[in-house]
Image (tube, helix red, strand yellow):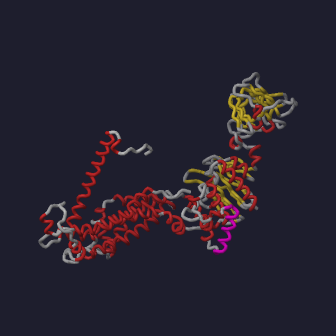
Amino acid sequence: MNEERLPLLSRPPQEIAVRVVVYGVLILVAIYFLIPLIVMILTSVKTMADIRSGNLISWPREITFDAWKEAWGTACIGVACSGVKGYFWNSIRIVVPAVVISTMIGAVNGYVFSKWRFRGSEVIFASLLIGCFIPFQVILLPMARTLGALGLSQSITGLVIVHIVYGLAFTTLFFRNYYVTIPDDLIKAARIDGAGFFRIFWKILLPLSTPIFVVCIIWQTTQIWNDFLFGVVFSAGDSQPITVALNNLVNTSTGVKKYNVDMAAAIIAALPTLFVYFVAGKYFLRGLTAGSVKG
Amino acid sequence: MALLSVQNIWKSFGSVEVLKDISLDIDSGEFLVLVGPSGCGKSTLLNLIAGLERITAGDIVIDGRRINDVSPKDRDIAMVFQSYALYPSMNVRKNISFGLETRKVPAAEIRETVQRVAEQLQIEDLLHRKPSQLSGGQRQRVAMGRALARDPSIFLFDEPLSNLDAKLRVEMRTEIKLLHQRIDATIVYVTHDQVEAMTLADRIAVMKDGTIQQFDSPQQVYDNPVNRFVAGFMGSPSMNFVQCRVVRQGAGCALLLDTGEGNAHTIPVGGEERRLDQWIEREVTLGIRPEQISGGSMNGREGSPVHELKSRVRVVEPTGADTLVCVLINGREVICRVRPEEAKGPGDVMTLMIDMSKAVVFNPETGERIV
């Protein structure tokens, strides 16, 4: 990066050719990925007549947000006809406690595994790690029985518990890997200063943990909001998250398939994770590669 | 009664024995230095005194109280770490007061203590800064301030100067010594640097492989090393070791020293006690420090411990105050400390005066001192 940067057209022809090819490939790939999103947005603002008479990527003759209003408030999902707003709030009621609780417990776990080694801690940690690699499908039946025994089947609380338990493997791993980069001398100094287990955690480790908290929250929010499998198995009817409701919406039709409403509903379902990405995306990468402080 | 008494301490990590039967006592106000090569167990011993590791066998007694099972915070000790271990998210003031706050000391007393400590260490201007905004020397001072604020009976230092550059190290060394004199603190100090050990200690414990080789004052450890390891570890440049044959000379013994220039020299050694008698016609290891071989000329006194040698210079290393000249004796390289104006160039033959009064002789197999 130290050479003088000549303007593009003055550089040797091979360099120009390479640049054209690289940019060309990148633009093609970007278009490939963006086309579905473009189609969705365009379709959601068209009227049904417009959709029938035009093609996938034609510009709307008139832009209308009626489909959006219908998707939010009046579309029929199953037998209920009040749009996706109820299910949107369900998802929020599932994601918020699940993310908060799994992150907090993961933080304490990571702290224990990295700073307070005890006999057998490595074995327990290894078995916790296996949880990261177990496919969701494997635990469906045992989990359904457990929830049933606890009286929590088909409820939001049950679904939250499933997400917490399943997320613990990842959150513990994130925090443990982060906390091992914090020097052990810090803990020793705090012990000599008289601090116990929780005071050390609260006063010394937590203030240093912002990057990994951000990583964890982003990861968990995205995983839990976008989840379909647990949602469809462990909830029913009014307690379903928006991902399941979206599926039901698309499958519910009394005659005419309202593509614009379906598209609008899909975009509404995707908005929170898109929002998280735009706001916090760069912190995610930064947090993953951050160590803690030295000395 | 000693303030700190380490009694027959053994420490193992699993099946690895790291400390073997360590015993030592320090009195109040004494500065004890634990010195030795990496892996000798000195930091482990410090951790045991601090309570950060469990003792496998033996006792540690502070002020008459057996503290084997007492947690670190109740042992009335404070520790300064090699990496300073300052809390990164807190400013200097909070770093110093953290321990006091944990003990629920009243706020006014905390403020007063922080102020006093900051003045003592000249860090009053830094109180609002975070550790990342301080230089290495400043961080070191804050770490010492944190220890001072606790007003403990014993200070523990774990290689605190190892992370500093050479010049700063010398300055901080003097500061630590001044601190010791000013507040009459009892200090246990771990280092691998024997110069630090010599300059700071009231007594030095030289350690190797989990045992204490010698526990004595600095001058004693320097002049009267108990074995070859201690002799070679202390002193810079280190002591010269030469294998020599013992021969009979008159009523006593002498060592054969061959410098390759003419005849071999026989140098009397062993004094009145005749300890070398059993070694006649056998090889021993002679230990002689560079400063005991100098330039100059003989005044020719019979019976003087100073003898003259001629040898060819191989390497010359000027250090400013002296010049280190490397010669060959009995086929081994020997460093001599001469005055700069007396030093010859490489390849020249030089006359050297070797002072046998402080020479030591070791058993070549066991390393134990004979004379």
Q: Quadrant of residue B185?
A: bottom right
- Give the dominant element type of the magenta stretch: helix, strand or loop: helix
Work out whether residue B66 can be spotted.
no
Q: Quadrant of residue B287?
A: top right
Which quadrant, please, contains the N terminus of chain A?
A: top left
- A233 relative position to B341: left or right: left
**Could you tell me residue A136's position as x and y percent?**
30, 62
Work out whether residue A218 can be spotted.
yes
**Camera-side residue: A239 or A122?**
A239
Residue located farthest toward the right when viewing the structure as drawn: B301
**Could you tell me residue B218's position as x and y percent?**
75, 48
Q: Which residues are magenta?
A: B106-122
- A285 relative position to B233: left or right: left
Question: Does residue A179 belong to the magenta stretch?
Answer: no
Residue located farthest toward the top when viewing the structure as drawn: B262
Q: Name above or below for residue B16 compared with residue B64.
A: above
Q: Name above or below for residue A13 compared with residue A200.
A: above
Question: Does residue B118 belong to the magenta stretch?
Answer: yes
**Camera-side residue: B323 or A9?**
A9
Q: Name above or below for residue B280 compared with residue A141.
A: above
Which quadrant, please, contains the C terminus of chain A?
A: bottom right
* Residue depicted at 81% across the width and 31% down the height: B296
**Could you tell me residue B253's position as x and y percent?**
80, 31
- A26 relative position to A171: left or right: left
**Could you tell me residue A65's position as x and y percent?**
22, 72
**Camera-side residue: B251 or A124?**
A124
Q: Quadrant of residue B92?
A: bottom right
* Residue depicted at 71% across the width and 56% down the height: B175
Circle count: 0
**Camera-side residue: A249 or B247?**
A249
